[in-house]
Structure formats: C-alpha cells, structure tokens
Amino acid sequence: MKKIVSSIFLAFMGGVAALGTVYAYNFYQNSSKQQLVNQSKDPIVHLAKYTGGSVSNGADFTMAAEKSLNAVVHITTQSEQNNLVYNPFFGTQSEQTYTAQGSGSGVIISKDGYIVTNNHVIDGANKIEVVLNDKRSYIGEVVGTDPATDVALIKIKETDLPFLSYGNSDEVKVGEWALAVGNPFNLESTVTAGIISAKGRSHIINGRKNPIESFLQTDAAVNPGNSGGALVNTNGDLIGINTAIASNNGAYQGYSFAVPVNIVKKVVGDLAEFGTVQRAYIGVSIVDINAKFAKENNLKQLNGAYVANLVAGGSAEAAGIQPGDVITAIQDSKVNSVSELHEQIARYRPGDKVNVNLIRNEKEVNVAVTLKSLENTTSLIKKAEVVKVSLTKLGVSLQEADNNELAKLKVANGVKIANLTGNSKLAAAGIKEGFIIMSINKRKIASVKEAQAAFSEVSGGVLIEGIYPNGTRAYYGFGL
C-alpha cells in the first residue's frame, strides 16, 4: 500500500508541475503577443518640450511705435472752392464760394522742421496746419511738390523736433513686419501692423501725369487720413510714405501702397535744394516681359525690362543701347520690371553716370550711361526764385471792382483791368481790358493791393482766373 500511495503522489506532483509549466509558457506567449499589439496600436508618446533654448513671446512693436508716433504729424488743410448753383425758379446759375477742409498725415524728417507728406494731401490748400503728437500746432509752408511721385515737402518754424531716420527700401523683404503710422479718419496717432506683401507695384494711381510708381504693398491697415504717414520697419526706420489703398468702398480692404523711401529721399532732397525735382531719364521705351512676350521675341529669360525703342538723342542712344536689349540691372540693383527700372532711375539727377547691365543676343553686356533730362541735357534746373514784379512792369493798370457789377455777375470778389499797354504780358496771354481778376495762382483777390502782393511773389508761372462783364469765365497762364 505504501508503494502504491507513493507512486500515486509522485505522479500527481509530476502532473501539477507539467501543468504549471504549460500554463506559464502560455501566459508568457500571450503577454508577449499583447505587448506587440499594444505597441502597434498605442506607441509610446513623449511630450515635445525643448528646454535648451530661450522663450520667445513673438514680435514686439512697442519701440518702433513709440519712436514713430512722436515723429508723425496730423495735417489739416483749408482750400477755397467754387460751386455753381442752379436756381430752378429763375433759370439762372450763380457761383458760391465755400471752404473745403481736408486732412492727412506727415513725417518729420529733420529736427529743424522739414516734413514729408503726399502731394495730394496739401494740393490746392490755402492754409496748412500741422499738429504734433504732443498737441503743439504750427502753420506749414510748402517748400515744393512732385505730383509724379505724389511727394511734397513742407516746413514748420521749430527746432529740436523728433524725426525719423531713413531706412533702405531696397533691403525690405516680402514677408517682413511693417507698421503704418498716421491719422485715419482723424483718429490721431494710430499704429497698425502688417507685413510687406509685395514690392514694385505699379498702375495704382493712373490719373497722375507721368507717374513714377514702384510702390511697396502692405496689409497693414491704411485708411483715408493715413496719406502722407509713415511706413516703418520694426527698428522704427522710415521705409515708405503711405499713399493709397485698393478698395471698392473707399476704406481698407487689405491692400495698401507706400512710396519707397529711397525715392522719397531723393525727391525731398531736390525740393529742399532746388525747389523742384531734378529728374533724370534713360531715354528708352520699355516693356514688361511675360512668357508670351518672351516666346514672341525669342527671349530666353523672363526677368528684366525689354527695350522697344530709343529716344532720339537720349541717354540710352548715346551709350549704345539698342532696341531688343533687355535691361536687367542698374548700378547692380536688379531690374525685373518696368516699374523697378523707373524706381532705380528716379534716384538720379541729369548728369549722373550709371552702369547698366543688359542682355543682348543672349550675352551679358555692361554699358555706362550718362543720364539726361527730358530736354536731353545734363544741366540742372536752377532753384526757383521769387520774381519781384510791379503792375507797371506787367503793363497793366487795375482798379477796384464795382460791388454792383460783382453782384450782377454773382461773384464775391475781384479787381478789374482798367488798361493794358502794348507790351503787356497779360495782353500777350490773351487777356482783354475789362476782365475781372478773381484769383492769381489760386489766391483769392479782393483788392488792387492784394493783386499787387500776389504778383510780387510769383515763382515762375502765373495762373489767372476771372470773369468778363458778359459773364464769360476764363483762365490764363503765362510765364514771367
């Protein structure tokens, strides 16, 4: 019995050991399989935190904004406007004079009071008021204007003013931050931020005569009243003068345009020194290049400006540039469009020499060009001087206009030409005796004394507006 029981016990224990071994093996296998399944479905995730660098809180515009706000001014203008009013009861027309008001912005560019703004901000203004960021107010005097670039220079009598330093618009990159500073909707000292969206934009303001357009485009909010204000980089350097917006409703819709500061710098320098812009021309008729144009003209490249024709006796002809050449750079600054070529040339004066890189018959050529004026000379225009002229020298005698006659003609002011001599400049311009002068160079004239003062301060040309006793209005312009 003892032997039988011992055998049974040993067999039982062996079975338990065998079952335990099998169970352990199966558990291990199942655990391994489950681990592989879990790894395939739920990989181990690590938090992607990097602790080895510094923490950035994003772009900071406070320094640039503070610097710009103190150098950007609010400009308000007043101008006399005439409006014809129709009387339906009597079937007559009468003229009413009213004062039109406008506003814009300006940028102080020197501590002695020189301020740059847009020409359209102060054009035709009889009075210009300049209000600083600290609320001080001054009367601004026009130093000079340039409608072609829509830039104007005015001055106030003050010293030790905060001003903005010029940046370099050539170095501006698409995508970099920019701030627009000005006075939109008469909301004084407003700063908006955006990026430079594009460079070299043209055909923006087509109504100007002989426009020079190579605008910086930005999506910083610009609205009516921002004109003439500053476009600055994050260092607070002036990179452009805000000028226009593309909009269907007259307000900001994401597209704003500024005159590059490299053009502004040259224009205001000329206005300060000469009272007018010393504009140089390369003497070519040029065309933008696109894929279709390149194919039609067997061009291998799409960059540059294509020379279609030359101005007879112009700078390009004298330098040996030929029709069919493609201008690719001016003074090592790349030219990819007509607007960019205009921008480069606008920085120079007649008589300046520039290196022009071009492609001719698929070969690179370098040409030295001496730039000329529109009259094909290298001479600079002398600074405009005020012409002191008397009524006697002009060959005209004036008399006070009769109030009854003015009332009959439905005009508020004027002086009458009583006599013209044979060598009178007014007579040579076509003016007849009896003509009533209402304004001289847009300056309202109400007395002989005012007419004498206006003629004695003429700079260059004269524009006279007036009316004849029969009610015929007329305008005359002539030089002195």
Image: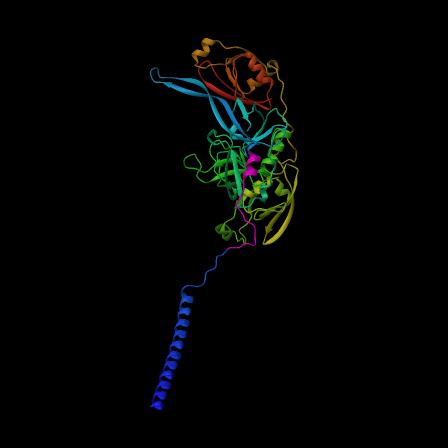
Of 38 and 94, the residue lying toward us: 38
Q: Which residues are magenta?
A: 49-68
Magenta stretch contains residue 308: no
Q: Residue at x 62, y 17 (%)?
A: 389
Assign the magenta stretch its main secondary structure: loop
Query: Residue 135, how many percent across, how many down?
Result: 54, 26
Magenta stretch contains residue 66: yes
Which quadrant is the N terminus positioned in?
Answer: bottom left
- Classify residue 203 as left or right of residue 390: left
Query: Residue 405, how many percent across, how many down?
Result: 45, 10
Query: Residue 359, how many percent across, how many down?
Result: 59, 51
Of 479 and 267, the residue lying toward us: 267
Query: Residue 461, how many percent across, how many down?
Result: 58, 24
Q: Residue at x 43, y 66 (%)?
A: 39
Which quadrant is the C terminus positioned in?
Answer: top right
How was this image coloured? Answer: rainbow
Measured along the vertical axis of the image, is residue 114 above or below residue 23? above
Of 9 and 398, the residue lying toward us: 9
Q: Residue furthest front?
A: 2
